[in-house]
Amino acid sequence: MLTKQEDLDDEKARKQKRENIEKNIGVKLTSNNEEEKKTFSELLKEYEDSLIKQGSDSFDAASSPVYLSWKAYKRIAGYALRYSNEQIDPAEWREVYGLLIGHIEEGKRLIVSDAIPMTVGDAHGVEFEYIHYADYAEIDGNVFQRSIEDGKEEFTVGWWHSHPGMGHFFSPTDTATQLYYQSLNPYAIAIEFDHQEKSEDNLGIKALRLTRVEDGMESPYDFVELRYFVDSNKEIHEKIKATIAKMNEKMPEVLGALDYIDNTIVKKELPNLQKKFSLLLNPEEEDEEEYKYEEKSYIWDSESITLTKGAPKFRAKIESEIEQCSIQLQDLQKKSATEKYNQKKEQFREKIKALLDKPNVQLHKVMDDYGKAYEVILPFRDFLDSKERKALENFEEWIYGYFRVLDNLKFALANL
Ligand SMILES: [Zn+2]
């Protein structure tokens, strides 16, 4: 991985680390005097001591073993093998990067339950981006502390990347990355995968930690004991072989389906639906936050018919229709014209229902379309990275919003 370390706001990062540790040890260590500021290693030492005091006698975070779930292994190997395998020219092999999710059990072992693919690099490695820091912000000191206490809370416990054909070691960039992770959480682990190391009895994977975080970039590293849940290496080997064979066969189709969702459904079908039957605010024209969280109504008072630019016209029309109908019905109710009231009510309902049926039919067409494409993707969703998953998330977020508004309108109609 290449680093853009110089881009990072060092002072801010240091402050954040210090604050996290202060939270954990419950002692304020920050001083305004630069001379008095403790070095990070001192803080770490104090933190480790405080854990020992809490009763973890055998506390040795840096050498605590790592347990990897089948799911985590499968995602690491699967995603890495998409970009480097024996069928691809070695000159084209690319490194991949991801995050590890898990918890700490009894302060003694690190359990890695999942490994999320994040990004693929170019031929020269994976660019180290701010996104990693944002991801890692999840490793809040308190979450980490709770994980030690009850062994349940899952959080980001480290990172993984591939070394296609390079073997297992820490490059200076890897050290810098691991330094960041491990200085916040002494259990944090780096996992490396090299498909060329994979053989009958070798899973091509190693876990690494720095042995002297306090030495910063000078810190040596060591391999950490890696264990697997239940399955033996041989069983995992057999399972991964079958998984990869299936993945290799289906991946072109999966990427085709993904491309269809992204370029046809999300970029064409959804905007068409919104153009014809607009129910959602146009986020480009309205405040995005408002679009997401505010249940807005578009019934404007007749004196000032000014609908804001991004407001959905179709929804405004239906809401106005419902409003008009209910005024007329209330009127009839006041006059105790029961028969006419019932008759009108039925008419209004039919009319508005007919209006709502149109987007409903279209929506279900889009959903069917998506469903077919998603069926192809689903068995391989684990091997998609953050960018690829984004297309699915975009669709799901949009459709959820659209359905919600439609449901609200149906509810309003039912209560007419
Ligand atoms: Zn590396």
Image: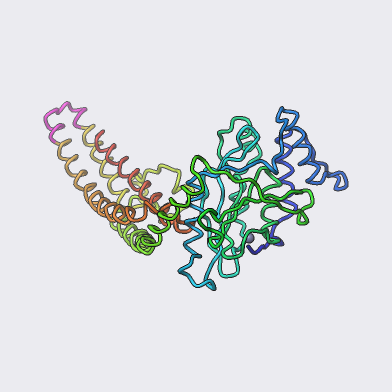
Please give the count of numbered marks on the rendered protein: 0
Q: Is residue 122 left or right of residue 170?
A: left
212 in relation to 120, above or below:
above
Residue in view at x 28 percent, y 37 percent: 411
Residue 77: x, y in percent? 50, 55
User: Residue 342's x, y, as percent?
Assistant: 14, 32
State which region is magenta.
Answer: 332-343
Residue that appears at 75% across and 54% down: 220
Q: Is residue 7 left or right of residue 286?
A: right
Q: Position of residue 140 (x, y in %)?
A: 63, 41
Residue beneath the point at 12% across and 32% down? 340
Give the main secondary structure, helix, strand or loop, of the magenta stretch: helix
The picture places residue 193, in percent across and down from the top left corner, at: 56, 57
Coloring basis for residues: rainbow
Task: Name the quadrant of the N terminus.
Answer: bottom right
Q: Is residue 84 left or right of residue 46?
A: left
Q: As rendered, which of 260 and 200 lies closer to the eye? A: 200
- Locate residue 344: give its quadrant: top left
On whether residue 103 falls in the magenta region, the answer is no
- Relative placement, left or right, of 43 versus 192 is right
Of residues 53 and 22, the one drawn nearer to the viewer in this rendering? 53
Question: At 32% from the left edge and 57% from the top edge, which residue is drawn?
Answer: 373
Seen as rendered, the residue at the extreme right is: 35
Q: Quadrant of ligand 1?
A: bottom right
Q: Quadrant of the C terminus?
A: top left
- Image position of 93 with respect to 282: above or below: below
Whether the magenta-drawn stretch holds residue 338 is answered as: yes
Position of 168 relative to 107 (above/below): below
